[in-house]
Image (cartoon, rainbow, N blue to C red):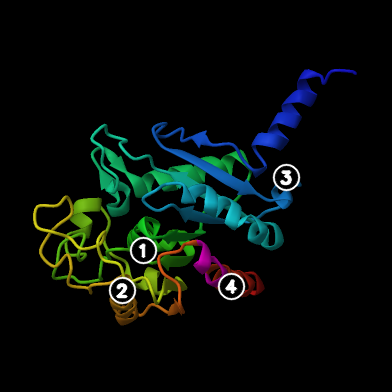
Amino acid sequence: MQELGTSGAAARARAIYDYGQTAIFASSADPRLHLLLYVPPAAAEGRKVDLLVAVHGTGRTSAIDFRDGFSEFGLFHDCAVLCPIFPVNVLGDGARSGYKYMQEGDIRYDEVVLSMVAEMAAKYDQDWSTFAIFGFSGGGHFAHRFAILHPEKLWAASIGAPGSVTLLDPSRDWWVGIRDLEARFGKAFDAEALARVPVHMVVGDADLETWEISHKPGSAYYMDGANDAGTTRPERLDALAASFRSSGVNVTVDKVAGVSHDRIKVLGHVKAFLAKVLSERRAA
């Protein structure tokens, strides 16, 4: 059997590892952090596609669940899926939750995501100057806080069952509110830009366990007001929706009957929302 030439082998490797359900890549901006993608055939054919960034929860394995779970959506809607992976213990201290609050030591996770998007846009010759974001549980933490910080980068945001929420409260500091947003992150809150982003919020109505989301004095992210948005995830999501709406944001809320803290069982609602936004966006 004739062996593949160098160019043929390179093309085959690119087809296997860089398109479809890809290999896991290190971020060039910060190789401690990783990503994997679904890249649809349209991109391999040189056509322009949209982008969804899907952010894992505390266990991190949902990065693969989301890449694979959105692959069919990406195939039929010409939409790539980029899933960051932010490892536990990235600073050697065993911490699991730093990414949820945007900053951990020398890492600004929002800026890392922007660099990942820019790097992959260049790799695949795409215009991903704006993209959609989705996250569930710990990823829901990240998704809504990213939307608060970078609404101008988003054409949609879907926020799934975050354990704790940042309300658009100018009387309280981050992460409970946004009073010190500019001092902390170098960027002022832009209510008008956020109001232009279609926002979806989803949670199971049986997602009622509180053991992981109740902040106790002395814990890593405890601060005054940490539990004021409600006791359960549905209550906290209601508070977040009300806060966003009070700032002029159009929020669609799905409470999925009979579902507990199950990321897979909410994906259908996320896909329906994103498909609607994509259709309207492309028609415009």
Q: Is residue 35 above or below residue 201?
A: above
Q: Is residue 166 visible?
A: yes
| Label 1 or label 2, whichever comes before in sequence order | 1
Residues at marks 4 and 2 touching, judged by CB atoms closer than 8 Å: no
What is the CA distance from the residue labelled 3 to the residue labelled 1?
31 Å
Give the residue pinned by disc 1: 144
Helix, strand or loop at mark 4: helix
Identify the residue at image location x=36%, y=50%.
58
What is the CA distance from the residue labelled 4 to the residue labelled 1?
19 Å
The amino acid type of the residue labelled 4 equals: Ala
Give the residue pinned by disc 3: 44
Between residue 48 and residue 93, name the one nearer to us: 93
Residues at marks 1 and 2 touching, judged by CB atoms closer than 8 Å: yes
- x%, y% of residue 130? 51, 58
- CA neighbours of label 4 inside 10 A, class few (<14), some (14 to 19), many (20+): few
Judge whether residue 97 is colored magenta: no
What is the CA distance from the residue labelled 3 to the residue labelled 4?
25 Å
Q: Is residue 128 visible?
A: no
| Label 3 or label 2, whichever comes before in sequence order | 3
Q: Which residues are magenta?
A: 264-269
What is the CA distance from the residue labelled 4 to the residue labelled 2?
21 Å
| Label 3 or label 4, whichever comes before in sequence order | 3
Helix, strand or loop at mark 1: helix
The amino acid type of the residue labelled 1 equals: His
Q: Give the main secondary structure of the magenta stretch.
A: helix
- x%, y% of residue 224? 10, 64
Give the residue pinned by disc 2: 240
Judge whether residue 268 is colored magenta: yes
Give the residue pinned by disc 4: 272
